[in-house]
Amino acid sequence: MNTKTPDQVLTESLRMKLKEIMQKEIERLPTILEGLDDKERINVICKLMPFVFPKIESVSMSAGEPW
């Protein structure tokens, strides 16, 4: 018997509502970006980049490793 607590139901409902809101905003994003000046648009794009591209980590060689 797997029943949800009221808190679990509320959390699930809240997540679904937030997901709907975010989807609508993502769909509006191209129009919003077009309305910004160049400096603002670049700033927004830079802030969104970490959500799209993986984080790059520097790699260094250790002694004895092949090239």
Image (tube, rainbow, N blue to C red):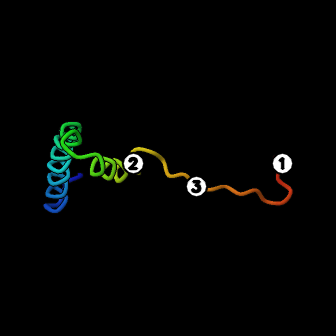
In the rendered image, which residue does mark 1 sit on? 66
- In the rendered structure, which amino acid carries the disc numbered 2? Met
What secondary structure is found at the residue carrying circle 1? loop
Alpha carbon separation for disc pair 2 and 1: 33 Å
The residue at which mark 2 appears reads as 49
Query: Quick one: 40 or 61, which is closer to the camera?
Result: 40
Instruction: Evaluate if marks 3 and 1 touch, with contact meaning CB atoms under 8 Å apart.
Output: no
**2 or 1: tag closer to the N-terminus:** 2
User: Do the CB atoms of the residues marked 2 and 1 lie less than 8 Å apart?
Assistant: no
Q: In which quarter of the image is residue 6?
A: bottom left
The amino acid sitting under disc 3 is Glu
The amino acid on which the numbered mark 1 sits, given as a three-letter code, is Pro
Q: Residue at x 50, y 52 (%)?
A: 55
Horizontal and vertical percent for residue 35? 18, 42
Mark 2 or 1, closer to the camera: 2
Q: Earlier in the sequence, mark 3 or mark 1?
A: 3
x, y percent for residue 30? 23, 37
Badge 1 crowding class, 10 Å Cα cut-off, few under 14, some 14 to 19, many 20 or more, is few
